[in-house]
Image (tube, rainbow, N blue to C red):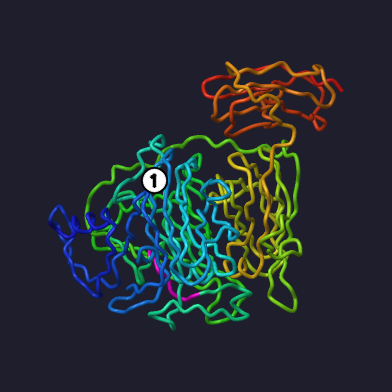
Amino acid sequence: MNRRDMLLKAIQAGVLLSLPKPMQFFANEKKDAVLTEMVGNALRFPPVFTNGGTMTLANSTVQVWPSQNTSAIAINGSYPAPSVVIEKGQQFTANFINNINEPTTIHWHGVSVPEIMDGHPKDAVVPGGSKTYTFPVISRGGTYFYHSHGDMVTAKEVYKGFAGFFIIKDPAENFNLPAGEYDVPLCIQDRRTADIPEFTYSPGTNEMTYGYLGNTVLVNGTPDAYFEVKKTLYRFRLLNGSNARVYKIAFSDSRAFHIIGTDGGLKDAPVSATTFTLSPGERVEILADFSGDTIGSNVRLVSTAFTHSGTLPYKQGIALDIIRFDVTATGSSGGVVPAAFNPITYYDIGAITNTRTFTLTMGASHPMHKINGLTFDMNRIDWEVPQYALEEWKIINNTADFHPMHSHGLQWQLYSRNNNTNLPPSDKGWKDTIILAPTETVRVLVRFTDYKGIYLFHCHNLEHEDDGMMLNFKVIDPIGIQQIGTSVPSEFKLHQNYPNPFNPSTKIKFDIPKAGNAELKIFDISGREVAVLLSGTMQPGTYEADWNASKLSSGTYFARFAAGNTVKTIKLILAK
């Protein structure tokens, strides 16, 4: 078995690989070998978690730097934590055992899950305790992750190793993208060279102000990482797993690549780019082509320098090497850059029912970070959001630091930055984490469709989060929709609205004979969607929706009810 095959089989088996430096190798299956002096460590891949198995969190000793021991908080003894790889539509189950000495919990970042499974710190598992996390995988195919969400210990536990990939594969997404060994997840985290080999976490005032920053990068837990590539197209899934570090991603030779995915999966089409910003908690997927490179050459993925305030030597915006790609052989992934993916339905700003404003601040005498003047109180609900309602969340950054804002419970859509709707490609698509630069204002369109319950809105600079920049909100029953009959109807049915004509409100009754996804939307005569009254999973019964059209003009509208393979439409007349 040659070295290339050994590497592939080890990756598939989930074996951690750490190769000493320097080393030499021959790497060309067509025999036109080139001898290359290699410096660094081969990129590691964490083991793949077996669905239905056990995740045991414990203080562990791992090898991060060659021949040196590092104290970590690891799941099943692995740093990074085991990767979950699962298909959409499956039921995910993990028995979590907490063997560290503080209460903690697992948050499934970006994945749509019921409240009790979301990993809210109110649901923490006590030391020595256990919890079975189980939920249907209904989110889009994409690159997600999981990590600690213990109360005021999230930053420490993530820094010391408590985080891992959660990758959802959607068999319906067949676009001939690179797969197998050519589909490569890259978790990027910064650490401090002065602390090698330990993950020393001891934040002071400066770290609580700007976040706990390092000056060297680990990729999948690998220092000085390199990855051997062939002269072909690769898919890289980039995850910023750092506590506070913001990366400005590019290749060292400024080559172009294609951005194909954001936090919530594939975009509607690939977009060519040479750089993008990746903040803590964000994910971006790219296609990179090495077919034009020479065997024996290499290129680095880097974070380029940018200006930002902070304290030296651990400062935001310093230039960093991330990983080196060594071109070692010819070959083909069989992957292509598609012309387009499945279309994304972008929300209509004109259909919002409510606008909320969130102002981010930092205290003058103490570096406590706040949202609307509030810090986190586990027992306080700060606002309620009706399920299915389309809301605008206007987030204003009144501080001199970055804030990657993250919402649990949904994927949202960024609408504008400082009133500019011409967004970079890493902003367009489905998102759950959105970075705000100092003094920046963003507008986000939000609709909760899957679950009701208590969720979190917070900064994903983990020091800011632990310092209080986090609030509770509750997704409640949709306004205007109520169940008026509990008997099981015999068929899907959309009844004529009443009154009709109406001004400005009307009632629309519909029957659902079996549980499943259902939608009730309103369109104007040109076919433009003007309201969503229902979009999610419904139980059998007879329901009635109230629709208030006070913001719309007189005219003809259509209510469209869709459930399973059934579609019903009625005409509504608004007469003002």
Q: Which residue is mark 1?
A: 86
Across and down, in percent, residue 454 comes to: 64, 51
Answer yes or no: is residue 321 visible: no
Which of 358 and 41 lies nearest the eye of the viewer?
358
Which residues are the magenta region? 214-220
- Horizontal side of 169 relative to 352 (left or right) equals left
Answer yes or no: is residue 42 visible: yes
Q: Is residue 209 above or below residue 438?
A: below
Question: Which residue sits at x=63%, y=25%?
Answer: 541
Question: Which residue sits at x=74%, y=19%?
Answer: 497
- Horizontal side of 331 relative to 381 (left or right) equals left
Question: Which residue sits at x=59%, y=52%?
Answer: 408
Which of 141 and 152 lies nearest the eye of the viewer?
152
Question: Which residue sits at x=40%, y=43%?
Answer: 169
Across and down, in percent, residue 279 comes to: 54, 61
The quarter of the rendered structure image containing the N terminus is bottom left
Residue 325 in magenta stretch: no
Kindly state the secondary structure of the residue where label 1 is placed.
Answer: strand
Q: Is residue 479 above or below residue 436?
A: above
| Amino acid found under the numbered disc labelled 1 | Ile
